[in-house]
Amino acid sequence: MSGFPIYLLDDDAPVRDALSLLLQTYGMKVESFGSPEVFLAHLDEGRPGCLILDLRMPMISGLQVQERLQARGIDWPTIMITGHGDVNACRRAFKAGVMDFLTKPIDEQVLLDAIQAAFQALETLLERKEARDQLAGLTEREREVLEMVAKGLSSKEIAGALDVSARTIDAHRANIAEKLGTSSVADFVRLSEAGKPPR
Amino acid sequence: MSPIHPPLKTLLWTGLLWLGLVGGFAAYSIREQVSAAEGELETAGRTLHRLISQKVAQHDAHLTGLVALITAADPIPEGAIRQVSQSIVRFYPRVTAIHLVRLPMPGETGALTILSEPEGPAPDFSSLAAPIAAQRQGQVRTYSDPATSGRYLLGKRATYGNPGIAVVVQVDPSRLVEPEDVPARLHLRLSFDGQIIFERPAAKGPGAGPLIATPHFSQTIDSPSQPFLLEGDRPIALGDVIRLSPLLGFALVSALILMAVQFALAQRRKARQSEQRAGLLEHETRLAHAARVNSLGELASGIAHELTQPLTALLSQSQAAMRLTTMPDGDPALLAQALEANVREAKRAGLILKRMRDYISNRHPAPVLSDLNQIVLSVAELMRPDLERHQIRLETTLVQPAPEAVVDPIEMEQVLHNLIRNAAHALGTGGFIRVETWLQGESTLVTVADNGPGIPPDVLPRLFEPFFTTKQDGMGLGLSLCETLLGRVGGRIEGRNGEAGGALFTLTLPLGDAR
């Protein structure tokens, strides 16, 4: 299993304990919280993980917690759990960008599948973030050239399209390779794709 | 109004209707009787008219026959005339006499009777001589008999030579009518030239009571020679037409029918009223049930949420425990911990279910000596999660020793549930609800107070009115039901605004006899 931590928020201690124990038997790192305030205060932005939030809690609902996290720029995959299979709550949750919506009591396999999917989403998210960070170091012209290389165009073709010499394009490619730490066209394609904003 | 005894007004109208019916029946039967009598008179009059007309026509025929005989030979065949006259008088008893009269010559006076049948001294016809002499040929005329009252004479001139001969026939008008042809109650009169020539009073007078009608019949006899006026009267007295037994019978029957109709109408009214009452009752029962189900629906939703938690814990702990047993390095302490948690959670679920069962239980109200503090705690525990979701604080302050009252605990819980739910509704989000128990003399009080907007003054007087509600989707039965439930156990409920604002409901219950 992936090494991402799982952040669990539920006001009911027995539920919290049970889910923690179950996930721990799968070797997952679970950090559980009984109150939204404590949860929001202790969440480490430097340690991305999967969020499991109880929808119905006194004072602050799971959705409100998620909103506050998004306000802080934390958009980690979220699994909403609830005692009510309320269609409206479910719709609102998905609109708010929740990955999955599970109804209590939650079956082991369903929970594991959801967490698996969340981890994959988190990985992609982090890759994108990294790619964006790397691409951010390129100049406008370099990004343009990278885009065309990723599309499979040759230096000569790119030169023709941009109305510059092939030598200039080669210089750009050398700079790009240096900045991204790779000269492989396959890496270029991967980074270019990951760097695009998610659709 | 009582459905069994019709109101006085109805009785009065029925009485008037009955009088009208009986009066109508009497008037109808009088009219029928009078009309029947008129018909009878008309028929009898026509019959008499026909008979008299036939008879007087026979007189003309006799005269014609006699005149023919007189003129048949010269000298006058007296023998034959006598013979014919004898047979006429014998066969027609109303023809009482036949005379042959020689009219006076010019210059003479008096008339000489030549022949009389029956024989005897001849009457003096001198007063008739001139008028008969003046009669046209073939004409027959009626004269009153100067000698015998109650008879009339018919005169006809037989010869026009000198001296002229005339035939005079004396008729007894009373024999123109056979007694059996005259109805008993008919008063008959025959007159000529305004003079009554024959009158026959009714054999039977009118009945008792005043005369109400006197049908009259009059017709002139069809005869140029004897144009008598035939008149008949049939006086009708009230006693003749009022048949007491049919009238009494009708009065009795109609009274019975009216009473029956009255009774049937009353029954129908009663049936309709009880039907309406039943409909209303059914409506109320249905609404009350709906209110109960509604509050139970809310309750069920709360309980479902509560049950979900232990079930979630149970499922996950069990699955974790199963994993632990299959792991080679599974920690037995962890397994025991998981199983202990399961036992705890199962018990928790059981408790929730027990509470639900106690609350929903369909058993009939069974007032028992109950600990009110316990009831308050039970409801508070049930409602707290839902209230907390709306950030409403539920506080309970319970007096010690715990007050006991003879109530149905479940109904009491419903009352408190209603009051707390109303308070929560008034509060919306945030605020607090305080439930307290008190001891006050022989009573125990339970107060439910909130710090919401309070009860509007215009709503206060109608708080416990059924179907009165300020909630958009409310039915207005909650507080009304509370009042009913409390009333059943000798308690009461009051609602007002607290000194510090917000609504304050006070339940007052008689203390149980345990302490």
Image (cartoon, helix red, strand yellow):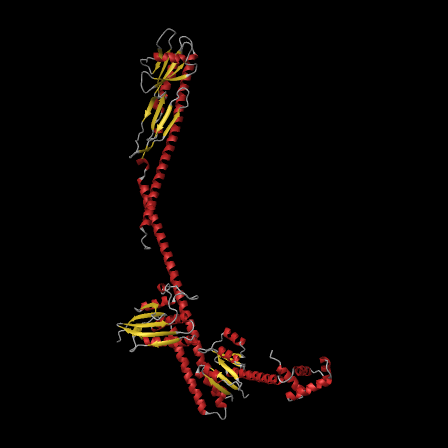
Quadrant in which the C terminus of chain A appears: bottom right
Q: Is residue B199 above or below residue A178?
A: above
Q: Residue at x 36, y 74 (%)?
A: B434
A195 or A100, which lies in front?
A195
B233 or B83, which lies in front?
B233
Count the marks.
Answer: 0
Q: Residue at x 32, y 51 (%)?
A: B7
Residue A98, x across and y down, in percent: 53, 78
Residue B415, x across and y down, in percent: 36, 70
B115 or B138, which lies in front?
B138
Asked whether residue A196 is in view, the answer is: yes
**Residue farthest to the bottom, as pictured:** B329
Asked whether residue B362 is in view, the answer is: no
Residue B473, x across and y down, in percent: 44, 66
Quarter of the figure with residue B148: top left
Q: Is residue B31 above or below residue B18?
A: above
B460 or B502, which lies in front?
B502
- Give the left or right position of residue B226, taking residue A135 as reference: left
Residue A123, x across and y down, in percent: 57, 85
Quarter of the figure with residue B436: bottom left
Q: Is residue B406 above or below residue B51?
A: below
**Residue farthest to the top, as pictured:** B107
Quadrant in which the N terminus of chain A appears: bottom right
- Give the left or right position of residue A150, taking residue B457 as reference: right
Q: Is residue B106 above or below residue B48?
A: above
